[in-house]
Image (spheres, rainbow, N blue to C red):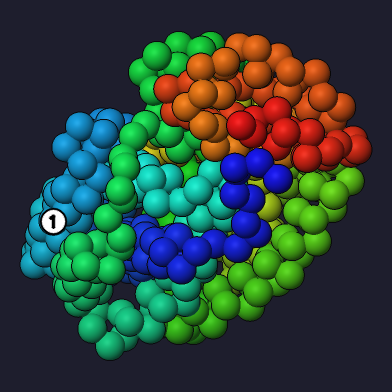
């Protein structure tokens, strides 16, 4: 072979880096999500808890600051070092948890949540993962992080009510503060120190690529989608815990009995749907179908929010659609974004998601307070109807997968010629050689016969 090492397995260092950073990413998300299923009920015990607008603002406040600081934190990590930026972000998160945990009104809870969000380390964590993994294993490492987020969200809906019974919402905030504080020495002593730290186009946002990404109509459709998905999520959690309490004999500590079976059903149905979408190149069909199911779920909520079994039915439809959409969106972004702009596309996508959290929480609280529960879900239905129209008119995502290859300094100097030669190979849909990063990014047609040995021969010495 060439001098390129194409080992199928991660090294112990890569595995340690990926697992430890995924756990830190998941821990931060746990602190955000744990309160979702019980916060509205807890908030009503506070002096200003009769104001649903403040409840929604407290729930969604972290989204605004996360959207503001996420990309700057990632860029700052290039200049000041990955770990230093992560330390600062975790420290801000700890401070936010402590403020929310000791708060005696919703205004201070909202301030604490905003400070939590300001500790936006996700971009810096992603950049550190890229520093610590070889190109051919980076997708696996990112998949670990993505899987951690999904598992964290599901566990939060189940653990939140249980922990609330034991330590209360204030205790949950303080517990996550302790765990986040422990994460700081984990980053210092367990996460490996990268020997070389540099910019990675596949994992980081570039200001030079922002205009290209923001002008792409297909990516804008997907950005609206993630905005709508998380706006609806945050808006509904202003209402759903209260609606369950009003329509059932279950107290807030027992709400996990509803979420657990609903989540299990949704996961069982999600897996074959995603496999079918990827293997049969039916991603657009599955994606748009899930959006329509989400629209139906929101309409069911609007009509049946006063009935316990109606809420259960609506939640089941909601989580089936949510899990499929949440798993599909990153894959579609990767397939549709220009190879050299993937990191920027994902950065904008994640920022839009955070904005959705803030807007959804705030508007959900406003609508619930002034117009009632059903108005929240009518708002969510409108968001989904717009998304359905945008999705139906979008291009079908190409059936491709991305591969990355490290280049020698000699080959990197021949960037344009090398990219053209790789692009001419059978089965290659797009090829980009980034000389300054020393990598080649290749999009492969999943249904074509291709010979990786030919690519390795071209990029070898």
Residue 171, given in percent of the width and then of the height, sits at: 20, 77
For residue 32, what is the image quadrant? bottom left
Quarter of the image containing the N terminus? top right
Observer-nearest of 420 and 204: 420
- Identify the residue at horizontal 74%, vertical 18% (top origin): 421
Residue under numbered circle 1 = 91
Q: Is residue 90 above or below residue 368?
A: below
- Identify the residue at horizontal 32%, vertical 82% (top origin): 163
Quarter of the image containing the C terminus? top right
Residue 207, given in percent of the width and then of the height, sits at: 36, 18
Residue 52, given in percent of the width and then of the height, sits at: 30, 51
Q: Is residue 48 visible?
A: no
- Identify the residue at horizontal 89%, vertical 46% (top origin): 280
Q: Secondary structure at mark 1?
A: helix
Furthest residue in direction front, as rendered: 461
Q: Is residue 188 above or below residue 332?
A: below
- Identify the residue at horizontal 80%, vertical 18% (top origin): 424
Horizontal arrangement in the rendering, residue 147 relative to residue 344 (left or right) = right
Crowding at label 1, few (<14), some or many (≥20) Cα neighbours within 10 Å? Answer: many
Residue 59, given in percent of the width and then of the height, sits at: 31, 52
């Amino acid at each position: 072979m060439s001098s390129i090492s194409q080992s199928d397995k991660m090294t112990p260092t890569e595995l340690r880096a990926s697992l430890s950073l995924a756990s830190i990413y998941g821990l931060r998300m746990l602190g955000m999500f744990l309160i979702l299923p019980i916060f509205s009920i807890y908030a009503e015990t506070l002096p200003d808890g009769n104001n649903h607008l403040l409840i929604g603002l407290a729930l969604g406040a972290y989204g605004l600051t996360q959207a503001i600081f996420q990309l700057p934190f990632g860029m700052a990590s290039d200049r000041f070092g990955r770990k230093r930026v992560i330390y600062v972000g975790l420290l801000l998160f700890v401070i936010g948890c402590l403020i929310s945990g000791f708060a005696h009104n919703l205004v201070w809870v909202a301030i604490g949540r905003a400070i939590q969000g300001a500790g936006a380390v996700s971009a810096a964590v992603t950049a550190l993962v890229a520093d610590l993994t070889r190109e051919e294993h980076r997708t696996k490492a990112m998949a670990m992080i993505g899987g951690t987020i999904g598992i964290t969200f599901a566990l939060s809906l189940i653990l939140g009510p249980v922990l609330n019974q034991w330590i209360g919402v204030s205790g949950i905030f303080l517990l996550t503060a302790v765990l986040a504080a422990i994460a700081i020495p984990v980053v210092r002593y367990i996460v490996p120190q990268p020997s070389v730290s540099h910019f990675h186009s596949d994992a980081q946002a570039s200001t030079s690529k922002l205009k290209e990404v923001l002008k792409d109509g297909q990516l804008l459709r997907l950005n609206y989608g993630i905005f709508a998905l998380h706006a609806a999520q945050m808006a509904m959690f202003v209402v759903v815990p209260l609606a369950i309490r009003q329509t059932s004999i279950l107290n807030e500590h027992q709400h996990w009995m509803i979420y657990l079976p609903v989540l299990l059903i949704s996961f069982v149905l999600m897996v074959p749907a995603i496999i079918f979408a990827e293997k049969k190149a039916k991603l657009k069909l599955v994606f748009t179908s899930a959006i329509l199911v989400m629209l139906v779920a929101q309409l069911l909520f609007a009509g049946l929010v006063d009935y316990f079994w109606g809420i259960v039915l609506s939640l089941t439809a909601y989580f089936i659609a949510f899990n499929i959409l949440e798993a599909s969106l990153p894959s579609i972004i990767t397939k549709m974004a220009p190879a050299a702009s993937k990191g920027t596309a994902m950065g904008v996508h994640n920022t839009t998601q955070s904005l959705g959290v803030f807007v959804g929480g705030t508007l959900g609280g406003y609508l619930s307070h002034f117009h009632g529960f059903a108005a929240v879900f009518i708002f969510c239905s409108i968001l989904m109807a717009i998304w359905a129209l945008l999705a139906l008119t979008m291009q079908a995502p190409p059936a491709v997968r991305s591969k990355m290859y490290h280049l020698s300094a000699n080959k990197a100097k021949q960037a344009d010629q090398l990219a053209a030669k790789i692009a001419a190979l059978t089965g290659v849909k797009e090829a980009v050689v980034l000389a300054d990063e020393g990598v080649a990014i290749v999009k492969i047609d999943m249904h074509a016969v291709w010979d990786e040995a030919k690519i390795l021969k071209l990029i070898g010495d």
